[in-house]
Amino acid sequence: MRLICVSRYRSSVGSYESGQDVDVTEEVAGLLLRDSPGSFALPEPARENPEPEPEAEMVPEPLTEAAMSTETETGLVAPDRRARGGRRRR
């Protein structure tokens, strides 16, 4: 059985370094996985037809309002003039 050593492991069963592929019997593999499950991982099976990942398209969001604008009581959008020292519309 094949295991991949994820982190360094040392015991009476053996000594393995991170990233090492380990080929052991099923009995030893079961012992290693029970003794230190964080140190070993089962290899992922290779996919036959890997699908290419779609490229992310950069689509800018449309600007709907200017910066620092507020909606008035009538539903109109008016700029907030407090940033320039003016009064706020109601």
Image (spheres, rainbow, N blue to C red):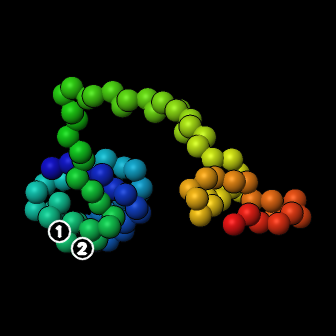
Residue drawn at point x = 22 percent, y = 66 percent: 32
Q: In this view, does 7 lie above or below 77?
A: below
Quarter holding the C terminus is: bottom right
Query: Where does the image place residue 24, in percent across and percent down from the top left?
Result: 19, 53
Q: In this view, does 30 lie above or below 76?
A: below
Query: Disc 2 on helix, strand or loop?
Result: helix
- Report crowding for label 2: few under 14, some 14 to 19, many 20 or more residues within 10 A (C-alpha): few
Query: Where does the image place residue 7, in percent across and percent down from the top left?
Result: 40, 61
Residue wearing tag 2: 35
Query: Where does the image place residue 53, in percent across and percent down from the top left?
Result: 36, 31
Query: Residue at the right extreme?
Result: 85
> Residue 40: which numbered mark, if any?
none
**Amino acid found under the numbered disc labelled 1:** Leu
Q: Is residue 63 left or right of residue 10?
A: right
Q: In this view, does 7 lie to the left or right of 75?
A: left
Q: Nearest the camera: 66 or 73?
A: 73
**Amino acid found under the numbered disc labelled 2:** Asp
Q: Nearest the camera: 39 or 15?
A: 39
